[in-house]
Amino acid sequence: PFLDSVLSATDIRNFPRKNFPAVLISGNSDLYVPSEYSVKTWRSHWPSIDVRLVNSGHVSGMVLNRHVIISSAIDVLRTVATSTSRPVNHRQEDATLL
């Protein structure tokens, strides 16, 4: 009903396919985005995504697994940094693009 229609608006399949490095951290007890859905649907829609499962629910995963979130962000930044061949421009006017 109403909640289903609201939540379905956030379905990844409603958005253009992606092809850049990213990490999805999914809780194995997540009721909003079940891990079975995450692994299959996200990987089919976003082939370059790295799915990492944590032992938690949706909100508790953000609270209790902060170290996973931080290390995942660092991993993605390292991947982007090593995969780009163009030099990084550190001019002030380009800072908003980063």
Image: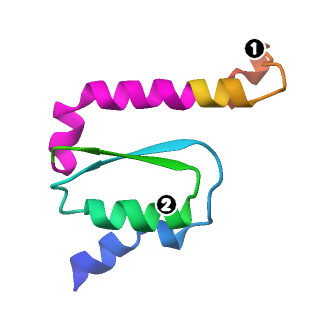
Q: Secondary structure at mark 2?
A: helix
Which is closer to the viewer, label 1 or label 2? 2
Q: Is residue 96 visible?
A: no
Q: Which mark is residue 52?
A: none
Quadrant where the image shows the C terminus: top right
Q: Which mark is residue 43?
A: 2
Q: Is residue 70 at all visible to an observer of this figure?
A: yes
**Residue at x 18% of width, y 33% of height:** 63
Task: Give the residue drawn at x 22%, y 32%.
Answer: 65
Looking at the image, residue 87 lies above or below residue 43: above
Q: Residue 92, labelled with which disc?
A: 1
In the image, taking residue 7 as reference, residue 77 lies left or right, namely: right
- Of mark 1 and mark 2, the one earlier in the sequence is 2
Residue 83 rendering spot, x and y as whole percentages: 72, 31
Is most of the magenta stretch helix, strand or loop? helix
Q: Could you say which is closer to the camera, residue 25 or residue 63?
A: 25
**What residue type is disc 1 on?**
Gln
Q: Which residues are magenta?
A: 57-77
Asked if residue 1 lies in the magenta stretch, the reply is no
Q: Is residue 32 left or right of residue 89?
A: left
**Coordinates of residue 44 in the picture (x, y in percent):** 52, 67
